[in-house]
C-alpha cells in the first residue's frame, strides 16, 4: 500500500506573471525544461525567479525508466538551431548560471555528446561569463562521447546514479550502476579541476546502508557534490513510493556525505539534482 503523503511534502506552487512569462517564452522559442517534462515540484518557485533547467534534444527519451515522467519512444532528429535559440534565451533572461540536461538519445552515434558541446560553445559565445552545469546521460559508456563534453569545459558535470544498485533492474533497467560510477571517475581523470556532481532519490525501497554505500562509491570516483531528494511517483503506472523519508534522515545523509569528504551536499525532501545549482557551485 502506498503511504499517505506527509505534511512536509505539501508545497504551495507559486503562480503569477513571472511564471506565465517564463512558460510563454519557452513555448515561443520551442525550448523544453526538465522542470516541466518531469513534473518537478519546484518549477513554480524556480520559474518565478527566472531559473530553469533546460532540456535539449527534444522531450522524448529512448529509455523507459520507471521513475521518470518524460515520454519514451522514438525521438525526432536533432534541431541544429537549438544551441543558438537556447543561448539567446539565456542571454535574454540575463542568467549568471544555467543548467542544461537532455533526454537519453541512444539512437545517436555519440549519444548527443556533440550537441551538448555545441550548446556549451554557443553559450560561451553569446553569453560571456555565464556558468554552465550539464546534467548528462551515460552515453552508453562511450569515452570519446564523454571527452567531447568535458573538452567543452562546463563548470560542472553532473551525472545521476538515481538509486542504489539493487533497484536498477526495476527502476532503470536500461542503465548500469557501474557504468555511471565509471563515467564520473573518467570525467575527473580527463580534467581534475572539473567539478563533478551526482544525485539519487530515496523512498524507492532502498536501505540506509545502501545509500551510504552509494556515497562511498561516488567518493571513490572523486565526485565533489551529491544531491539527495524524495522520490515522488509521477503516476500509478510508475514505480510506487515505498517510503516518505523523514527530514531528519535527510539531514543525517547530508552529514554523512560531508563526513565522507564531499565538498558539499544537498539533502532534503524537495531537493532535486539541479535545484539551487548555482549556490552549490559557488560554494565548491
Image (cartoon, rainbow, N blue to C red):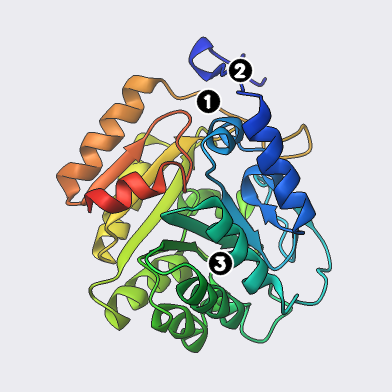
Marks 2/3: CA distance? Answer: 31 Å
- Please name the residue that numbered disc 1 is placed on: 243
Quarter of the image with the N terminus in it:
top right
- Side of 39 relative to 98 (left or right): right
Q: Residues within 10 Å of mark 1 (few under 14, many from 20)?
A: some
The image quarter containing residue 131 is bottom left
Q: Is residue 210 visible?
A: no
- Side of 131 relative to 137 (left or right): left
Q: How many marks?
A: 3
Q: Position of residue 206 (x, y in %)?
A: 46, 38
Residue at image coords 49%, 56%: 99
* Contact check, label 1 and label 2, Cβ < 8 Å: yes
First in sequence: mark 1 or mark 2? 2
Q: Secondary structure at mark 2?
A: loop
Residue at image coords 72%, 79%: 80
Q: Is residue 24 visible?
A: yes
Marks 3, 1: nearer the viewer = 3
- Side of 273 relative to 35 (left or right): left
Residue at image coords 75%, 44%: 24
First in sequence: mark 2 or mark 3? 2
Marks 2, 3: nearer the viewer = 3
Q: Which mark is residue 3?
A: 2
Marks 1/2: CA distance? Answer: 7 Å
Q: Secondary structure at mark 1?
A: loop
* Contact check, label 3 and label 1, Cβ < 8 Å: no
Foreground residue among 133 and 225: 133
Foreground residue among 73 and 89: 89
Look at the picture and state if 71 lies above or below 124.
Answer: above
Look at the picture and state if 284 lies above or below 44.
Answer: below
Residue at image coords 36%, 75%: 187
- Please name the residue that numbered disc 3 is placed on: 137
Q: Residues within 10 Å of mark 2 (few under 14, many from 20)?
A: few
Amino acid at each position: 500500500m502506498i503511504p499517505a503523503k506527509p505534511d512536509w511534502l505539501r508545497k504551495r506552487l507559486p503562480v503569477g506573471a513571472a511564471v506565465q512569462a517564463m512558460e510563454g517564452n519557452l513555448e515561443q522559442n520551442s525550448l523544453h525544461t526538465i522542470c516541466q517534462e518531469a513534473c518537478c515540484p519546484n518549477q513554480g518557485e524556480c520559474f518565478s525567479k527566472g531559473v530553469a533547467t533546460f532540456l535539449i534534444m527534444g522531450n522524448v527519451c529512448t529509455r523507459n525508466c520507471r521513475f521518470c515522467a518524460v515520454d519514451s519512444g522514438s525521438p525526432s532528429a536533432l534541431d541544429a538551431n537549438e544551441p543558438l535559440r537556447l543561448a539567446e534565451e539565456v542571454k535574454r533572461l540575463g542568467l549568471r548560471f544555467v543548467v542544461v540536461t537532455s533526454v537519453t538519445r541512444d539512437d545517436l552515434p555519440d549519444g548527443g555528446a556533440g550537441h551538448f558541446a555545441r550548446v556549451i560553445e554557443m553559450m560561451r559565445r553569446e553569453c560571456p561569463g555565464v556558468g554552465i552545469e550539464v546534467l548528462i546521460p551515460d552515453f552508453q559508456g562511450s569515452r570519446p562521447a564523454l571527452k567531447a563534453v568535458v573538452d567543452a569545459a562546463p563548470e560542472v558535470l553532473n551525472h545521476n546514479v538515481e538509486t542504489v544498485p539493487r533497484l536498477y533492474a526495476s527502476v532503470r533497467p536500461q542503465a548500469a550502476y557501474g557504468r555511471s560510477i565509471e563515467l564520473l571517475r573518467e570525467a575527473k581523470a580527463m580534467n581534475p579541476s572539473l567539478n563533478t556532481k551526482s544525485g539519487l532519490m530515496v523512498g524507492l525501497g532502498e536501505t540506509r546502508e545502501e545509500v551510504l554505500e552509494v556515497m562511498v562509491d561516488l567518493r571513490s570516483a572523486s565526485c565533489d557534490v551529491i544531491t539527495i531528494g524524495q522520490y515522488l511517483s509521477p503516476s500509478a503506472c510508475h514505480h510506487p513510493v515505498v517510503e516518505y523519508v523523514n527530514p531528519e534522515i535527510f539531514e543525517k545523509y547530508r552529514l554523512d556525505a560531508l563526513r565522507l569528504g564531499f565538498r558539499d551536499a544537498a539533502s532534503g525532501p524537495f531537493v532535486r539534482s539541479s535545484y539551487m545549482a548555482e549556490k552549490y557551485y559557488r560554494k565548491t
